[in-house]
Image: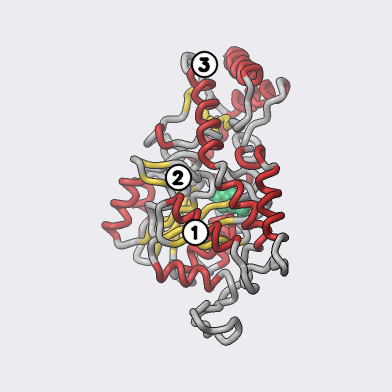
């Protein structure tokens, strides 16, 4: 998937470079470190932001972003009922209350639902672009109106844009993941981006036990002002990240081309509904989502694709990890969700997700594979009738 498909000699060369000095240093705050710093500098440049701070995973990145933004006990944080669970885990780990709300037809935060969910305790909205953009203008407008912070967990949307602006840079702070399913892959890893020096400093401190990293002070002599954890990135991981970042334009271009070819070949099918976008030109290429009649049709469609060697991505099969309606191991720790059938809280989202098919679109697809996939979608649509 995406960057993971292209791991090769360039990544190895960066690691070898790390080992080429007189003294090998794999620790980000050891003497003479440079790969993590360089990754941050290049990433900030790519995103067009002032600051980037690399950490150990995408989960760590949203955790640090929220901590840096001052989210803590007593705060309510609105987010979407369809997301990988990490941002909700991070909200919960900081002692704040996650408030998932229903998605709209674009499969993102519904601005009307965001506004309905706001209370005096609401501190932030975490928008989660799923390979494309939420209605960011509307959501940003609501955040401004109620004086709430807008944060983006853009783990799935590196390189995607909304009206020309890179996702992850529209809110106060944004986060990304470099895990195996994401646009850039480093084994494990993540990064936060922001133009806000205070959020950047606090997020960086949180990722390193509260160390304040003040110039001129040796490690251990630096003061602290808040607690933290060890969520640091290693130099080896950062080295891989440098090579992956250099491939980002190719990754985005190829998957977008592949997706366009596939979409153009299935657009005419009238019993599958391609997902609409708030800004299609800015969307990622690595994922294609469409909706069918109902849950049974989606399961039948999925089985049909599997028989032809094509797996689905998240929908419908991994829904249990990505839908608030099934997070009975986490949400009931809060009074608001205790003893409630969670499914009933987000009926629209549940129905939409269960009747949807989500496909991974690789970077490397030859004509034969593209034709096979198109054929499988066309015959699948016929089969469900
Ligand atoms: C993948 C993902 C994460 C977590 O990233 P990891 O690197 O796997 O920890 C966080 N948020 C979203 C929206 C994701 O999709």
Coordinates of residue 43 in the picture (x, y in percent): 50, 54
Quadrant for the N terminus in the image? top right
Find disc 3 in the rendering and name its residue: 265
Regarding mark 3 in the picture, which secondary structure is present there? helix
Regarding mark 1 in the picture, which secondary structure is present there? helix
Pointers 2 and 3 in contact (C-beta within 8 Å)? no
Find disc 1 in the rendering and name its residue: 41
- Horizontally, residue 304 falls left or right of residue 248, namely right
N-terminal of the pair, mark 2 or mark 3, is 2
Q: In the rendered view, tell whether residue 293 sits above or below residue 332.
A: above
Number of on-image labels = 3
Find disc 2 in the rendering and name its residue: 102
Q: Residue furthest bottom?
A: 221
Q: Residue furthest left?
A: 145
Q: Give the spatial CA distance, label 2 vs label 1.
A: 36 Å
Q: Nearer the viewer, residue 143 or 28?
A: 28
Coordinates of residue 360 in the picture (x, y in percent): 60, 33
Q: Is residue 301 visible?
A: yes
């Amino acid at each position: 998937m995406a960057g993971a498909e292209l791991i090769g000699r360039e990544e190895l060369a960066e690691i070898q470079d790390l080992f080429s000095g007189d003294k090998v240093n794999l620790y980000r705050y050891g003497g003479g470190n440079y790969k993590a710093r360089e990754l941050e500098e290049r990433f900030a440049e790519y995103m067009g932001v002032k600051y980037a701070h690399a950490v150990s995973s995408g989960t760590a990145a949203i955790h640090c972003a929220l901590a840096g933004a001052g989210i803590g006990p007593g705060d309510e944080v609105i987010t979407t009922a369809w997301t990988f669970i990490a941002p909700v885990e991070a909200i919960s780990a900081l002692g704040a209350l996650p408030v998932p709300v229903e998605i709209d037809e674009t499969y993102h935060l519904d601005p009307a639902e965001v506004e309905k969910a706001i209370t005096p305790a609401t501190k932030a909205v975490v928008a989660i672009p799923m390979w494309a953009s939420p209605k960011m203008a509307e959501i940003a407008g609501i955040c401004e109106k109620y004086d709430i912070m807008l944060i983006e967990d853009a783990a799935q949307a590196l390189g995607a844009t909304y009206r020309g602006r890179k996702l992850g840079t529209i809110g106060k702070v944004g986060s990304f993941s470099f895990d195996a399913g994401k646009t850039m892959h480093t084994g494990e890893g993540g990064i936060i981006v922001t133009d806000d020096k205070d959020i950047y400093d606090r997020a960086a401190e949180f990722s390193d036990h509260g160390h304040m990293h003040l110039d001129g002070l040796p490690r251990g002599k630096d003061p602290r002002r808040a607690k933290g954890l060890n969520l640091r990135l290693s130099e080896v991981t950062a080295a891989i990240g440098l090579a992956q970042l250099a491939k980002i334009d190719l990754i985005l271009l190829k998957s977008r081309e592949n997706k366009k070819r596939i979409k153009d070949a299935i657009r005419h099918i009238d019993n599958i509904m391609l997902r609409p976008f708030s800004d299609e030109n800015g969307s990622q290429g690595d994922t294609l989502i469409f909706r069918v009649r109902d849950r049974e049709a989606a399961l039948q469609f999925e089985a049909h694709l599997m028989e032809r060697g094509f797996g689905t991505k998240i929908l419908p099969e991994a829904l249990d990890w990505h839908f608030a309606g099934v997070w009975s191991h986490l949400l009931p720790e809060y009074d608001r969700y205790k003893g409630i059938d969670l499914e009933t809280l987000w009926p629209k989202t549940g129905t939409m997700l269960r009747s949807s098919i989500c496909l991974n679109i690789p970077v490397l697809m030859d004509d034969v594979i593209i034709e096979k996939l198109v054929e499988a979608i066309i015959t699948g649509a016929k089969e469900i009738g």
